[in-house]
């Protein structure tokens, strides 16, 4: 009895390692030339301040023909959204669209629905692989884990955490100022991940002040399996 009690005291005195919970990833597909996107931009900018949530804003370019060329849009962002269209069995891409953890979606104007999806995703069970930045951020190592059928992709995403105020001078939002936050500025597929440990080389950032995130995601626009953000 004395030995058991002593062992209990020793175990109680040992420090417990806290396991960091993976944040819920909320992707916003938006455009400065989209007349209904301003409200979604403003809402997601506020949601970005919520603990346990990572908002990533992906501006798309397919509304540029309306008269205003989005200042942050890149074709690869629209390609990413199109992958979700196929995965989520949607008819076509649209804005503003919100995708939660790569597997749930809603229009960016339905704030209560988005909050419900975020809560649902926060309670989902995850068993992410270990992701570690090595060599001063020049490399990232993804550990072993369960890979889905078809494997997964490892993505490098760099975003600007600052709030951006964009004065739109033409098109549907002419004369308005669009507020955007966590705008993605760089995105690159680093390679495949099939459940075994693998190292990936990271390109140097093209801009100052960006935050770097590594996302392990089911291939072709699927569920997000793991995420790590480089500490500044």
Image (cartoon, grey):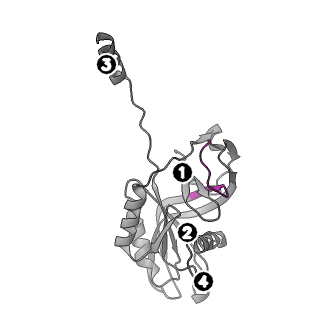
State the extent of the magenta-drawn residues as a range: 144-158
Judged by depth in the image, the label closer to the viewer, 3 or 1, is 3
Q: Secondary structure at mark 3?
A: helix
Q: Is residue 30 left or right of residue 123?
A: right
Q: Nearer the viewer, mark 2 or mark 4?
A: 2
Q: Does residue 211 appear anywhere in the picture? A: no
Name the N-terminal-most of marks 4 and 1.
4
Q: Nearer the observer, disc 1 or disc 2?
A: 1
Crowding around mark 1 (Cα neighbors within 10 Å: few <14, some 14 to 19, many 20+) is: many
Mark positioned earlier in the residue sequence (2 or 3): 3
Where residue 58 is drawn, which disc sits there? 2
- Give coordinates of residue 224: x percent, y percent: 55, 57
Q: CA distance from mark 1 to mark 2?
A: 17 Å
Residue lying at 59% horizontally and 57% vertically, measured from the top left: 217
Residue at left 55%, top 69%? Answer: 58
Q: Is 89 included in the stretch rendered in magenta? A: no
Residue at which label 1 appears: 227
Q: Is residue 200 above or below residue 166?
A: above
Q: Residues within 10 Å of mark 2 (few under 14, many from 20)?
A: many
Whichever of labels 4 and 3 marks the residue nearer the N terminus, that label is: 3
Residue 72 relative to residue 181: left or right: right
Identify which residue is drawn at 32% across, 14% down.
6
In space, the residues marked 4 and 1 are separated at their CA atoms by 32 Å
Q: Earlier in the sequence, mark 3 or mark 1?
A: 3
Q: How far apart are the alpha carbons under marks 2 and 3?
A: 52 Å
Nearer the camera: disc 4 or disc 1: 1
Pointer 4: what residue? 64
Q: Position of residue 110 (x, y in %)?
A: 38, 76
Q: CA distance from mark 2 to mark 4?
A: 15 Å
In the rendered structure, are the residues bearing label 4 and label 3 in contact, judged by CB atoms less than 8 Å apart? no
Q: Quadrant of the N terminus?
A: top left
Q: Which residue is mark 3?
A: 9
């Amino acid at each position: 009895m004395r030995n058991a009690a002593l062992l209990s005291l020793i175990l109680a005195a040992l420090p417990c390692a806290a396991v960091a919970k993976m944040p819920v990833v909320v992707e916003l597909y938006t455009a400065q030339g989209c007349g209904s996107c301003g409200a979604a931009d403003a809402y997601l900018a506020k949601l970005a301040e919520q603990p346990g949530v990572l908002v990533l804003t992906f501006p798309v370019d397919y509304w540029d023909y309306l008269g205003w060329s989005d200042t942050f849009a890149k074709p690869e962002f629209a390609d990413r959204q199109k992958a979700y269209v196929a995965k989520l069995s949607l008819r076509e891409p649209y804005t503003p669209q919100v995708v939660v953890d790569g597997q749930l979606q809603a229009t960016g104007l339905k704030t209560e629905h988005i909050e419900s999806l975020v809560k649902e995703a926060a309670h989902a069970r995850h068993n992410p692989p270990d992701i570690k930045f090595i060599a001063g951020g020049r490399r990232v190592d993804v550990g072993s884990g369960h890979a889905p059928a078809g494997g997964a992709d490892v993505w490098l995403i760099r975003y600007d955490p600052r709030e951006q105020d964009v004065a739109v001078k033409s098109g549907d939002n002419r004369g308005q100022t669009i507020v955007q936050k966590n705008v993605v500025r760089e995105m690159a597929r680093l390679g495949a991940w099939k459940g075994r440990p693998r190292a990936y080389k990271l390109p140097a950032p093209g801009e100052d002040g960006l935050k770097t995130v590594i996302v392990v995601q089911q291939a072709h626009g699927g569920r997000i399996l793991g995420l790590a953000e480089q500490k500044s």
